[in-house]
Image (spheres, grey):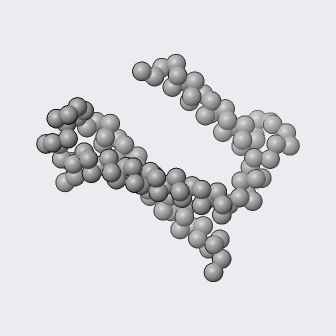
Amino acid sequence: MSLHRLRPYTTVIMMIAFLIVVVTGIILFFAPHGPGGMRQWIVLGLSKHQFKDIHVYLGTFGVLLVFFHLYLNWKAIKKYLCCRSLCRKHPATWGIGICACLVIAAVQFGT
């Protein structure tokens, strides 16, 4: 069996894991903080501690899936990152630019 047959499964599993990490991250953002925040707080039948566990485990699993995804799609990724000419339409230029803007915004406006 070729590993390339796993591409669609890897993508869908990674997408679902990402969505769950986003939802648990939003829930944890609004959860009460401090030592007493974990005792009585229950949402959807889960405690804050359980949400944190789900968030960490699926986040770690998602990172591993990203590496597997990179391995499966390495040919296409090399084409995306090819630096023949850095013009406006080059995906790597856009990726670097957007990430740089987000890092600058986080440093400037973060707490």
Query: Which residue occupies 19% across, 54% down?
Result: 45
Q: On the picture, is 69 further left or further right than 23?
A: right
Please tell me in which quadrant of the rendered image residue 17 appears. bottom left
Please tell me in which quadrant of the rendered image residue 3 appears. bottom right
Quadrant for the C terminus in the image: top left
On the image, the x and y values in percent for residue 12 come to 50, 62
Q: Nearer the viewer, residue 68 or 13?
A: 68
**Residue located farthest toward the top when viewing the structure as drawn:** 108
Q: Nearer the viewer, residue 57 or 10?
A: 57
On the image, the x and y values in percent for residue 13 come to 48, 62
Question: Is residue 15 among the parts visible in the rendering?
Answer: no
Vertical placement of residue 29 versus 63, above or below: above
Q: On the picture, is 93 further left or further right than 70?
A: right
**Residue located farthest toward the bottom when viewing the structure as drawn:** 1
Query: Which residue occupies 63% across, 81% down?
Result: 1
Query: Which residue occupies 59% across, 61% down?
Result: 68
On the image, the x and y values in percent for residue 98 come to 62, 33
**Residue located farthest toward the front when viewing the structure as drawn:** 35
Question: Is residue 93 among the parts visible in the rendering?
Answer: yes
On the image, the x and y values in percent for residue 78 come to 76, 53
**Residue located farthest toward the right when viewing the structure as drawn:** 84
